[in-house]
Amino acid sequence: MPYWDVDRDQVLTLAGVFKLLQEGAIKHADLFGLGAKAMAAHGESWVLNRVAVEITRYPRYEERVKLVTWSAGIRGFRGYRDLRLYCGEELVASASTLWLYINLRTKSLTRVPTELAERFPVGQAAVFRPDLDKIRFESLSDAASVTEVSLRYSDFDGNAHLNNTAYLDCLQTALSRQALPVRPRRIEMQFLKEVATTTSSVQVAVERTNDGAANFAVRSGGELHAQGLVTF
């Protein structure tokens, strides 16, 4: 783990975990013409829509990690992917993700080209969260604690919106400022309306539940950008 991805305790940040997952997904998709190279060639790209992650241990500075990932299938404009993160032989994180294939010019959903989908291998290993499509999130009440988090130039990516890893950076910042545990064991999250590059800050609302968890939402200007649940 590089120094710039660990926190004050020399433990991998929440955004750092998601950077590893994102990089693995992109690199694997690139091998079959469905990653960042597709964005340039077809004006199309994947955007993360849903994710469920379980982290049994956050790696520390200079620990070596291995990421294993595979496609769990492509259906129309939906792509399903599972990922596993290891430190040596120790499984430290498992994730299921749902990605949507979009036209970058129109911002509309578009089917994955048949010739690309057919040559994209589908793994046969068990999926971590086969119910990912069915996860529903609760609305927060007016009693939720809200933290304003400033956005930076580096938070935005090649899709001209707030990168999904930046959402996790904002979430961990809000957890810290609200004196909540900063390293949740589980994160379930849905990305909704994108955050434009002109946005200077977001509001992260967090509300504790009675079972060791918290619902959260990321908003700006009255728009709901993401929502989810963390378990401590």
Image: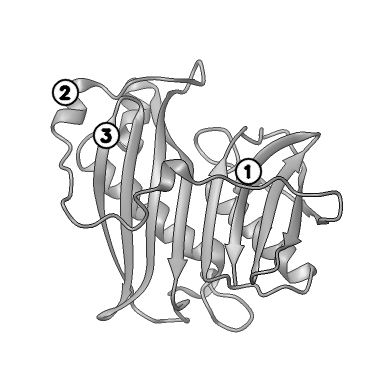
Q: Kindly identify the amino acid type of the residue bearing the numbered disc 3.
A: Ile
Q: Which residue is mark 1?
A: 226
Q: Which residue is mark 2?
A: 115
Q: Kindly identify the amino acid type of the residue bearing the numbered disc 2.
A: Glu
Q: Are marks 2 and 1 in contact (CB under 8 Å)?
A: no
Which numbered marker is on residue 103? none
186 left or right of 213?
left
Residue 35, percent across and down?
32, 38
Q: Identify whether 194 is placed above or below 109.
A: below
Residue 115 figure quarter: top left
Q: Which residue is mark 3?
A: 74
Q: Kindly identify the amino acid type of the residue bearing the numbered disc 1.
A: Ala
Residue 179, percent across and down?
77, 74
Kindly identify the residue that appears in the image at 63 percent across and 46 percent down. Answer: 227
Residue found at the very far front of the displayed protein: 210
Of callouts 2 and 1, which one flags the residue occurring earlier in the amino acid sequence? 2
Q: Are marks 3 and 2 in contact (CB under 8 Å)?
A: no
Of callouts 3 and 2, which one flags the residue occurring earlier in the amino acid sequence? 3
Cα distance between the residues tagged 3 and 2: 12 Å
Residue 47, percent across and down?
46, 36
Cα distance between the residues tagged 1 and 3: 23 Å
SS at badge 2: helix
Q: Identify whether 136 is placed above or below 147.
A: above
Q: Identify whether 228 is placed above or below 116.
A: below
